[in-house]
Image (cartoon, grey):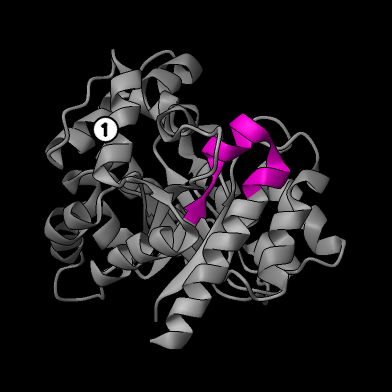
Amino acid sequence: MSRVSVIFPSQPGDASEVQPYAELVKRGAASRLWMGQSLRAETHHVLAYLAGNGYRVPAGTSVALMPLRHPFEAAVQARSLALLTGHPVVAGLGASAPEFVTQLNGVPYSRPATMAGEYLSTVRTLLSGGSVRGFVLPPLRHPRVEVGAGVLRPGMARVAGAHADVAITWMTPPEYIEDVLAPALHEGAGEHRDPPRIATVVHAAVDRPGRPSVRLAYLAAQAHLRSAHYTDMLRRAGLDVDPDDPGTGARTLVESGIFATGTAEQIAGRLRDYHRAGVDEVIVNTAGVFFARGSRAALADAEEILSALEVGDARD
């Protein structure tokens, strides 16, 4: 089944900022509400607040950063969110950039993929009622929690294949997903489990007067375009990007279609490329518009894109 979801494109300062995006999911325009890591209003708290205010919708984190919480706490938060929303939750978890880990811990992880595998395995075991070092979570009935892993490169894809239910990718071209990441997920899963389904966050903006696409791409992705692991992934996908030159990187995102722009119908066509490449859930991210023109404009773009997808699928 091909799904299309929406992500709140920033770190909220108040839960009310996220409510209109939750409304898209509540009325069926999107499959799931995703939020990234927030160091302002905490992601799980915001989603729980929304649930208590009538927005009990499927939710996902893309991604909660592993160095900020113990895996036992991550399991408790994920199943609490499933209980409060009444819907399955994707507990997306990511190892984070080495620079951020160093800021928190003094040193980076010596083997990030190994650490991530142990973390994901611990969360999965606890959520399934198993024991980790003699500790078992108290019984609690709740909708399913899918353990998600942030994936950019083949090494982490193999880890996700072994331990995750969902591989969450960001700024990954559909061809790279199909040719590089999907085989690595299958390799990691081996013969004893199904490979994770794939959920991909895609930057998008409807082409409108006075909104240069390259500028929007830069506003949306500048931090990632300065990041060594994101730019390495993009180079592996055949794109000429340099973490010291995010401006040129933004132009490359637009020219390659990784930043999807054009009419809503053209963007919908680009998003279908991801489904054809094996992505189960495409997550629409209108961050560029959000930072250029505000939340209302970003929401309008997301709604128009989702509507174009729905109309196109009905015709098909």
Would you place residue 36 above or below residue 132 in this image?
above
**Residue 74 spot, x, y in % from top left:** 56, 49
**Residue 232 spot, x, y in % from top left:** 20, 31
- Residue at image position (82%, 47%) is 16
**Residue 35 spot, x, y in % from top left:** 59, 49
Quarter of the view holding residue 121: bottom left
Task: Evaluate whether residue 134 shows in this view.
Answer: no
- Residue at image position (50%, 49%) is 62
Quarter of the view holding residue 137: bottom right
**Residue 76 spot, x, y in % from top left:** 63, 55
- Residue at image position (24%, 43%) is 256
Pick the front one: 18 or 66: 18
From the image, which quarter does the C terminus lie in? Answer: bottom left
User: Is 296 situated left or right of 250 in this image?
Assistant: right
User: Is 99 situated left or right of 48 in this image?
Assistant: left
From the image, which quarter does the N terminus lie in? Answer: bottom left
Q: Which range is magenta?
A: 284-298
Question: Magenta span has 289?
Answer: yes
